[in-house]
Image: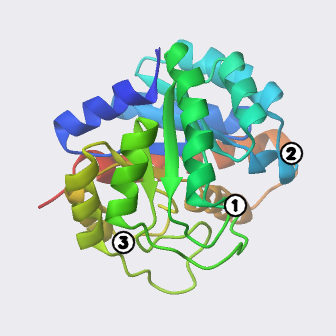
Amino acid sequence: MLTNLKTILEYAETRKCAIGSFNTPNLEGVQAVLRAAEELNEPVIISHAQVHEDMGLCKMEEIAPIMLFMAERAAVPVCVHLDHGTDINYIKRGIELGFTSVMYDGSGVDMALNIINTSLIVDEAHRNNVSVEAEVGSMGKSEGGQTVGESIYTDCDTALDFVNKTNVDALACAFGTAHGVYLKKPKLDIERVKDIKNAIKIPIVMHGGSGISEQDYYNAINAGVRKINYYTYMSKAAGDAVNAMKDRSFFHDIVNEAKRAITEDVKKAMNIFSKPQK
């Protein structure tokens, strides 16, 4: 069943857990993630990131109808999310296509422009019952894992001012995670998360969620994280499974093995996100 991000995150807030947001740049990814969610009977967020087009994976107009078709027929609540949109017109096209949640990534512009652009998107989105996520701070890497600048941790006072001026539904914060594969163990500033959550009173989003230890997940969720973006390691799980195949003669066998691996990896992640430990 199709729903928006605000509704799913209200559910997460009630349970004091986090909902996984998984990039699904093809039909097989959508099928694998939704299978995991249905087997566990958990709500889920499936995402298309603007950078998928730069990576040559799919165009928004191609994948959106597939994501929406599958979400509407799923047995669990599903949010169809447009992630890391950096172009206002691109995000507006996403709203027109039917995405139930959009993220404006203003980490590459100054704060004043981030507030202006986010406010414009919030006005458009909320008129269409679409939720909005935005970002304050920067992890120093793009969604594709490329370094785009220095990491800038989210400042609590700046985050509060931003939320008050934009009326966003969720806020992505930088506190030690990064997109892509971790070359060394990340050090998360959990106290920063607690302070921001206490100040802004809306759900916090963790980007770069792949590769974090179980304890770090638990600590972040207990501090206020309610949405965790996860893609790199589920994609790697599929690649590892295909590499381990004895016979890779047929593409359909490769696809089925990759889907199986993604489903199992997503289930492991969702089991952690949905049952935070003290």
Residue at 81% in and 26% down: 61
Name the foreground residue: 43 vs 142: 142
- Mark 2 and mark 1 lie on one chain; the one further toward the N terminus is 1
Mark 2 element type: loop
Q: CA distance from mark 2 to mark 1?
A: 15 Å
- Residue 23 visible at all: no
Q: Which mark is residue 187?
A: none
Mark 1 element type: helix
Q: Are marks 2 and 1 in contact (CB under 8 Å)?
A: no
Q: CA distance from mark 3 to mark 1?
A: 21 Å
Q: Which mark is residue 239?
A: 1
Circle 3 residues within 10 Å: few <14, some 14–19, many ≥20: few
In the rendered image, the residue lying farthest to the left is 278
Q: Nearer the viewer, mark 2 or mark 1?
A: 1
In percent of width and height, residue 66 lies at: 71, 22
Q: Nearer the viewer, mark 2 or mark 3?
A: 3
Dividing the picture into quadrants, the one containing residue 179 is bottom right
Residue at 37% in and 52% down: 161
Name the foreground residue: 263 vs 188: 188
- 196 versus 99 height, above or below: below
The amino acid marked with disc number 1 is Gly
- 110 versus 67 height, above or below: below
- 110 versus 133 height, above or below: below
The amino acid marked with disc number 2 is Phe
Circle 1 residues within 10 Å: few <14, some 14–19, many ≥20: some
Circle 2 residues within 10 Å: few <14, some 14–19, many ≥20: few
Q: Is residue 77 left or right of residue 249?
A: left
Which residue, given by chain and number where applicable, does mark 3 sit on? 213
The amino acid marked with disc number 3 is Ser
